[in-house]
Image (cartoon, rainbow, N blue to C red):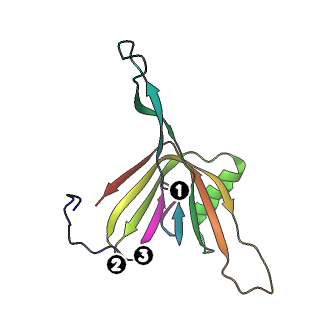
Amino acid sequence: MSGEADTGAAPLPSPRFTVDIAGVAKGLQFTEVSGLDVEIDGVDYRTPHSPAFASMRVPGMRASTTIVLTRGSAPRSREFLQWFQGMMMRTVERSQVTITRLDENGQPVARWILNNALPVKFSGVGLKATGNEVAIEVLEFTHEGLSVSTD
């Protein structure tokens, strides 16, 4: 036995989530989010008083990942379209993006907060008159820090 306490809680079903972009849109629905990773480089460190070959690893630089949001094409608000236009014109400012995971009753259970997030890519739908696939769009963000909270 590993010594960890079993909480008895059943795993949550496939997650549902919403995305809020501060000052732009609330409650955006996406079908997939990837890149919610935090990576910190390990750096070898040795003090002058350490034995000749003894060193320890300490936290180094934090690497930001690109957050990728995917969804079927959906109607957009005027604010979202203006924000997207600003992204193309390079006038959009960094903002906070909050991804909220919901339980089966629609109640928040966890939040991922992207600090100073900046949209770096938008892939719109491909148009094909003879196709019957769902039109998919992808929105990518870079950020200056990721924090997680549970509700």
Q: Residue 107's spot in the image, x, y percent?
A: 32, 71
Q: Say which amino acid is labelled 3.
A: Ser
From the image, tell me which residue sits under label 1: 35
Q: Is residue 83 above or below residue 50?
A: below
Q: Which residue is mark 3?
A: 14
* Residue 34 at x, y percent in the picture: 53, 61
What stretch of residues is rendered in magenta? Answer: 12-27
Query: Of helix, strand and loop, which one carries label 3?
Result: loop
Numbered circle sitting on residue 104:
2
Residue drawn at 67 percent across, 60 percent down: 122
- Asked whether, in this view, residue 138 is left or right of residue 46, the answer is right
Answer with mark 3 or mark 1, whichever residue precedes in sequence: 3
Q: Tag 2: Cα neighbours inside 10 Å, few (<14), some, or many (≥20)?
A: few
* Three-letter amino acid code at the position of disc 1: Gly
In this rendering, the label closer to the viewer, 2 or 3: 3
Q: How packed is label 1: few (under 14 Cα within 10 Å), some, or many (20 or more)? A: some
* Relative height, residue 94 to residue 35 (above, below): above
Picture coordinates of residue 7, whole percent (x, y): 20, 67
Earlier residue among tags 1 and 2: 1
Residue drawn 41% across the image and 25% down it: 55
- Sequence-first tag of 2 and 3: 3
Give left or right: position of 105 versus 18.
Answer: left
Q: Does residue 131 belong to the magenta stretch? A: no
**Most foreground residue, 100 or 93:** 100
Q: Amino acid at mark 2?
A: Glu
Q: Quick one: SS at disc 2?
A: loop
Q: Residue 148 appears at what percent x and percent y? A: 37, 53
Q: CA distance from mark 3 to mark 1?
A: 17 Å
Q: Identify which residue is drawn at 35% across, 75% down.
A: 106
* Disc 2/disc 3 C-alpha distance (Å): 9 Å
